Amino acid sequence: MPNLEGGPEFDDEDGEGDGESAGKDEEEAEEDDDESAGDSSVSLKVVVSKGSGPKLEFTCTAFREEITIDDMLIVEKTDTEGEEKFPYEGPEFTELPVNVQKGLFKFLELRGVTLSATNYMHDYMVTKQTQQYIRWMTKLKDFVRQ
C-alpha cells in the first residue's frame, strides 16, 4: 500500500537531518498530510469464477472515494499448464463502452467489492502496519538495552 495515511513517521527532534521539514510551517504540513491521504490506496486482484469454466480476473485500485478497474482478463483453464490467459486480452478497460464499464462495476459491487469493504481493508492494513511498527520498535529497544 503506497502512502499509508496515519503511518509511523520519524520526527527530527534535534533539528538535524536532511532539513526537508525544517522550513515548513504548520499550514504547509497540513496540506502535505491532506495530499498524501488522497494518494492512499489498496491494490487488489478480484477473481470471479463460475464452476470449472473460464474466470474473470480484475485488477483494481481502491481509493477512499472510488474504486477503479485497471485491467480485466478472461482466464481459461488448460489441461497442461493449469491456467492461461485468453489469447485476445480485449481492449483497455477505459476503452470499453461506458455502459459495459458501469455494468462491470455493478458486477463487482454485487460480489462485495464496495467502498465500505475496501475502506475497511485499508483501515485494517494501516492498523496492522502501526502494530507491526510498534512491535519492531519494542524489539529494537530490548535489543539495544541488552
Image (cartoon, grey):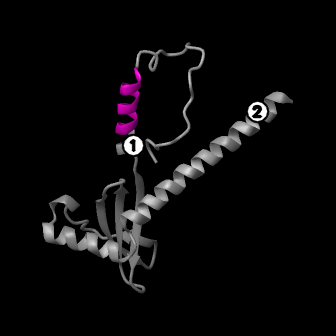
Q: Distance between the residues labelled 2 and 1?
A: 30 Å
Residue name at image x 59 percent, y 45 percent = 130
Measured from the top left, where is residue 97 in percent x and y?
13, 67
| Residue 107 location, quadrant | bottom left
Q: Which residue is drawn at 26% across and 65% down?
A: 89
Helix or strand or loop: what does disc 2 sit on?
helix
Discs 2/1, front: 1
- Tell me which residue sits at (42%, 72%) in the image: 83
Label for residue 37? 1
Residue 110: x %, y % from top left = 34, 77
Q: Which amino acid does label 1 sit on?
A: Ala
| Residue 135 position within the rendered picture, expressed as x and y whole percent measured from the top left | 70, 44
Q: What stretch is highlighted in magenta?
A: 25-35
86 relative to 84 in the view: left or right:
left
Residue 50, picture quadrant? bottom left
Looking at the rendered image, the quarter that the C terminus falls into is top right
Q: Name the residue under label 2.
A: 141
> In this rendering, is residue 113 above or below 143?
below
**Toward which corner of the image does residue 25 lie, by quadrant?**
top left
Q: Position of residue 67 (x, y in %)?
A: 32, 59
Compare residues 46 and 137 and report the one nearer the observer: 137
- Residue 29 drawn in magenta: yes
- Which residue is at the front of the view, 110 or 86? 110
Labelled pair 2, 1 in contact (Cβ < 8 Å): no
Question: Left or right of 48: which side holds 127?
Answer: right
In the rendered image of this protein, does residue 74 appear above or below residue 33? below
Q: Residue furthest front?
A: 26
Q: Can residue 4 be seen in the rendering of this structure?
A: yes
Q: Closer to the N terminus: mark 2 or mark 1?
A: 1
Number of the label disc, if any, that sits on residue 93? none
